[in-house]
Structure formats: C-alpha cells, structure tokens
Image (cartoon, rainbow, N blue to C red):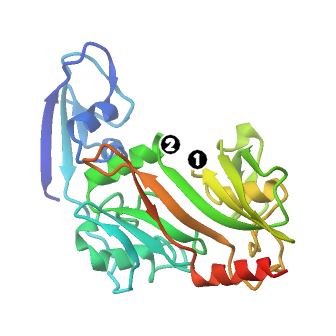
Amino acid sequence: MSGVTFDFVYSGTDKERLDRYLVGQLPDQSRSRLQALIKDGKAVVRGKVVTKPGYLLEPGDDIRIAIPEPEPTDLVPEKIPLDIVYEDERLMVVNKPAGMVVHPAAGHDTGTLVHAALAHAPEMEGIGGERRPGIVHRLDKDTSGLILLAKDDRTHRWLQDQFRQRTVKKVYLALVDGAPPTPSGRIEAAIGRDTSQRKRMAIVPDKKGRDAVTEYLTLESMAEHTLVEAHPLTGRTHQIRLHLAFVGCPIAGDKVYGRRKPSLPLKRHFLHAARLTITLPGEKEPRTFEAPLPPDLLHALNAARSR
C-alpha cells in the first residue's frame, strides 16, 4: 500500500512518549490512528521497530513513521436526508432523528448516520476509523438530537481533544417518571457492563467501572412527570438513562432502565440532545448549536402536562 514516510530527530531535553511526540509533529493525524500505526510496526526508533505507543524517546533519537493511505472502506454511501444544523469544509453538526443508528454495527449494516454522511460528504471516508468515519461522539439509536461529524483527521482530533478534556458542554432534555430527589443535583456513579445482560450497562462499584458524572436541573414539574436538563460531564454508554434511573426517576419510555410499560404515548425514551457548545477549529470563542424537541416528544410532553 502506498503512503508517505516521515523522519524526525527528537530534540527534547526530557523523555517523551512516542505517540505524544508524533501527534505534535503530525497534527493532521489523530492520536488514536498514530497509536494504531505504532502497534502495527510502522514506527522505527534508532533503526529498530517500536510497537509500544508509550515508548519513551530520549534526546537525539531518530524516528521514522510510515503513514499509509486510508484503507478503502466497504461502506456504501446512501442518500438518506440529513437535518444539517451547521456545516463548513471541516465538519457537520447534524440533528439526528430517533431510530437512526450512528455507525454500522451488528444488525445495522445499512441506513446509519455514517452511510448518510458519506453520501453527503464523500471526503469523510477513512476519517477516524474505517467503520465509523468522521464520528466524534455517539448518541443511542433512540436518542434524537445534535451530533458532530469531522471531515478531516485534524478536525477529528481537535474535536475529540475537547471531549477528552471535558470542555464540551452538552445539554439533554429528559422527561422522567416521578421527580428527582432534589430540584437540581449532581450524580456520581461508576458505570460498567451488566454482567447478567451483556447488552445493558449498570451502576457498579468504582473499581469495577468507569467514573461517570451527570448534573441535572428541573425545568418543569408536572403531576406524574418532571422535565429536566441533564448535563453529562463524562460520556459513558447510556449514562444519562442509568443515572436518572439510579436516583429514582427513570426516563419516560425507557423500557430498558425504566418502566416496562410506558407511562406516556411514547415509542422510545424521552431523551433529546438539545444543545451543544464547542470551539470550532480556528476559532477562539465556543459556539452553541441547538435542536428543538421533535414532534413525538412534544406530543408526549403535552400529554404529561394535561394529567
């Protein structure tokens, strides 16, 4: 496979990780891709192949890294309409509908957001990973709302770094059964795989899961339900759904972590990624994007208000 080879000489005075050094030298490449290339034997230090991304460079080390061309993907673009909230030459902000899977996975080989995005912006192919090009973060299949897609590796890294550093502000709207224990609060509970049902997640002891933090704020109290804003400070799978159920107010319509029989006329859980604040490449001040509640959730909200 053709590609390009880069040569460097490490001029630092202290030891530095190989992957971290290469990210600084090759800003168009994401750290995850460079780590994968190192593990695949594409990096040579002092004439010897190095396969550990955390290999510590010493002053004077000569480094060679081979960057192959992105592998062709077997994903076939599909002309599926997209609700694009914002777009430029580097990224897209899409208002994803409920029912759409973000990227191909078992049982979902077609009709995903990735398939639709590739038809709209073919240059995304290979960005961030063959099976999920351009994807910076994810939303559950039945969660609607805002999601980011990068069109090049440099933008992908720029956006992912903000998620990693927790500077991205995400605001979700959730209608819950009952009410949270306090009008506002902070939920800190580790999340891990449910050992009895592998497709589910669960609240687990700190040492057995990943830390997860969600802040919430009551917006409106009703007879049997509460509309809340949820602000996830971490990005764990099913985090908001699990955390709200954990404090006794599961999301309406959530048959996995809440009531098996929905309390409202809902065909999915009432969770919507309504607002996203992030700094775009080349800009100093963050931008905020918004997506209104879709009709099915508005209908359910009005039904809750009328009780």
Cα–Cα span, label 2 and label 1: 7 Å
Outermost residue on the top side: it is 13
Question: Percent position (x, y) of residue 44?
Answer: 22, 34
User: In what element is the residue under mark 1?
Assistant: loop
In primary-sequence order, the first of circles 2 and 1 is 2
Q: Residue sitting at 26 percent across and 58 percent down?
A: 152
Depicted 160 relative to depicted 17: above or below:
below
Q: Residue at x 28, y 49 (%)?
A: 281
- Residue 166 circle label: 2
Label 1 crowd bin: few (<14), some (14–19), many (20+), radius 10 Å: some
Q: For the residue marked with disc 1, what is the amino acid?
A: Thr
At horizontal 23% and vertical 18% (from top left) the residue drawn is 12
In the rendered structure, the answer to whether residue 166 lies left or right of residue 232 reads left
Residues at circles 2 and 1 in contact by the CB criterion of under 8 Å: yes
Amino acid type at circle 2 is: Arg
Q: Is residue 149 left or right of residue 270?
A: left
To which residue does mark 1 refer?
234
Q: What residue do we see at 54% from left, 65% from top?
A: 274
The C terminus lies in quadrant: bottom right
Residue 186 in which image quadrant? top right
